[in-house]
Image (spheres, helix red, strand yellow):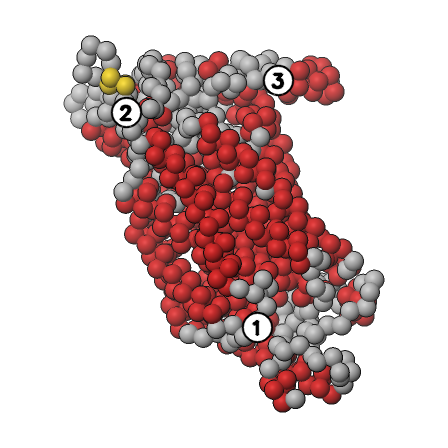
Amino acid sequence: MTTAILNPSKSPSGHEPADGPLAQARKYSELFQRSEIDLSCRYPVLAFFVSGVFWLLVGSILAMLASIKMHNPHFLSDWSWLTFGRVRPAHLSTVAFGWGAMTGLGTLIWLMCRLCRTPLRFPAMLVIAAGTWNIGMICGTACLLTGYTTGIEWIEFPLWVGFILFVSFALVGIWAMYTFGARHAGHVYVSQWYLFGAIFWFPWLYATVYILEYLVPVKGVSQETIHWWFGHNALGVFFTPIGLATIYYLIPKVIGKPIYSYYLSILGFWSLALFYNWAGAHHIIGGPVPAWLVTVSIVGSMMMFIPVTTTAINHHMTTYKNFGVLRYSPTLRFTVFGAMSYTVVSVQGSLMSLKVYNEPFHFTHHTIAHAHLGLYGFYTMVLFGALYYIVPRLTAREWASSRTIRFHFWSCAIGILIYFVLLSIGGMIQGFEMNQAGDSLFKLMHSHGWWTGTKLFVEGFKYKNGAVPFIEIVENTRPWLISRSIGGGLMALGHFAFAGLFLVNLLGIGPKRQGPTLLRSDEEGYRKALQGDEGTEHDEPSEGNMARA
Amino acid sequence: MNYGPLIFLGVFLTFTAAWVGLVFMPNAQLKDVQAAVVEGSANTNPRPYSGLEASGRRVYVAEGCVYCHSQQIRAGSYQADVERGWGPRRSDPRDYVHDYPVLLGTMRTGPDLTNIGSRQPSSAWHYLHLYDPQMVVPGSIMAPYPFLFEKRKISGQPTPDSLKFTGRYAVNAPEAGYEIVPTERARALVGYLKSLDHTYDLPPLEERK
């Protein structure tokens, strides 16, 4: 009996009543164990989170500069280090490798400890890793703004900066392997497979691309095949697994139910591992590369329907009966927004690899909108959900203001919707006009009315004869670029609001709250929503910190 | 699934398979591609870059031109590129043998530049356009590059390649006694842009035995 209390991961024998004293003791023992794990994670994970949020703010400012420069090219154009061609890669690198990777790694570390049921060991190693990563990011961003770049999209950082990031990642990787080996729980939860994959795949990916593009560069267009193998996989086998692992952990945790189907999660993981790796060359469809390569990647992209569908069923069916919780839980609202975006962006991504879709829209803003729905609508929103869940457990403080959380959510959600929808339309118009015969959509709509005009436009779209003068396409794109700045501005506003809230929590200067900070102060309704259609028993408060439990 | 080694093996094998397919195989197929020798001469198509053009290419990379300009002509069913006048034929792996990094690009906020040297051979046009694109092409959203130029007091004769603000550009001219002169970086960049000409014919690629 004592062993059962000391080792709470053992399953109940079945002879005791579910609410008996032993079950109670086990429950509190588990809660104690979790709070011990959270406490051990405090400094390393917060180091990653604080850095991540810092780079998010830097990246948002760079994004706004780049976006405004697209429709007002003379804006701050006298300074060479703020020219569009430098600010844009600096934006990508700071949000992807600063915000995305650092916050993602912080989440990964915390999830690893929670799922392996072991307190975090060697915290100093991780704090050093976070410091090293920041040094790399500062050097890299300075390099890009001074025009010192490799010129290869997604790996603009010079070799030595890449090396710094690699060393930092290696520290986290070694730590994660050690923690995985020292796990207490017998069962390996689906989130851990994804995290395991991300930890293993990324260094291989990163080392390959730097060696073959920089150290011993391959000749000619092979560079581009390797480049896009990396570019696509950075999303597919690093950011996506971390995002999915987080969703797989947070949705069941908050609503207190197991995932919908264990077998679907196995299928989803292995089909992702098998097919995502092959999709890279769909970025160079029509380019000067062997036809078989492009075909293989289109097949890989289409096969992605399997992991995407299974993951979507699993995520959405788990949420489905407790949809009401979205009205209360900040964590769930951000996470489910991310999960929904993942489904949409993945279906779109697969379709985009088809030639009929790719041909008109490949070189347009349509692709940019798609990329943002992926890295922002999905990945970033999920990370926000993770931050709302994890941070109170690390600082033992509730979020100071439910109003700020609501502002953060709506500002970012509306921002990304404006960004995605309007820029996608703008990109489609741009693509049609670049590839069609005859007059532009606007001209036809102006002279024939919107319905006949659209019909004439579609009929004239035969991939023939670039008849619309290029400068006219540029002018027609401009209003959509302005709408991008508006959407982006809303997102940036949300980021600054969140950063303020985060700072207040870290410093502990906000009002002291007793209960969890919900989106509406109606705990009774929250409890009802959690019960959903079937009553559920919670083993852990779904929002708020452990100190109260 | 409770077995770490099993997960590891699966994760390793799936990744290796794609690595062989998308990294190793294309390189094995393309690594022997050479520039085409022009019959009856020692020249090749494409020719190697001169020193000036190579350093201009570094300026092109540093200023991030690739984020708005592609360097690839699609063809086959993709006829629009050719009919738009961006190039007479589809781009070929041989067109890129001297390029590092290869700058295929992913975006056409601006036009494709594979053959900009043959479309626009005038240095004077390129200088004016880089200095202030909106002056030369009204409605353009291209970034201006005033920092690639310097304003100097004219002493004696004006510099030969200083910007010519004649005709409709006269309103943009600096005050009397001054001139706008391209820096070394601007000269190199324009040298590179003018070298971008892949309009030559290529013999069909030999089948690998």
Gap in angstroms between the C-alphas marked 3 and 1: 59 Å
Residue for badge 1: A185
* Label 3 vs label 1, nearer the camera: 1
**What amino acid type should be assigned to the residue bearing mark 2?**
Gln
Residue furthest toward the top? B40
Which of the 4 quarters of the picture holds residue A265? bottom right
Looking at the rendered structure, the secondary structure element under dot 1 is loop
Residue sitting at 42 percent across and 62 percent down?
A173
The one nearer the camera, A175 or A488, is: A175
**Can residue B63 be seen?**
no
Q: Position of residue A389 (x, y in %)?
A: 62, 66
How many residues crowd around disc 2 within 10 Å: few (fewer than 14), some, or many (20 or more)? some
Spatial CA distance of label 1 from label 2 is: 57 Å
Q: Residue at x 66, y 46 (%)?
A: A309
* Labels 1 and 2 in the same subunit: no
For residue B113, above or below residue A196? above
Q: Nearer the viewer, mark 2 or mark 3?
A: 2
Residue A461 badge: 3
Q: Secondary structure at mark 3?
A: loop
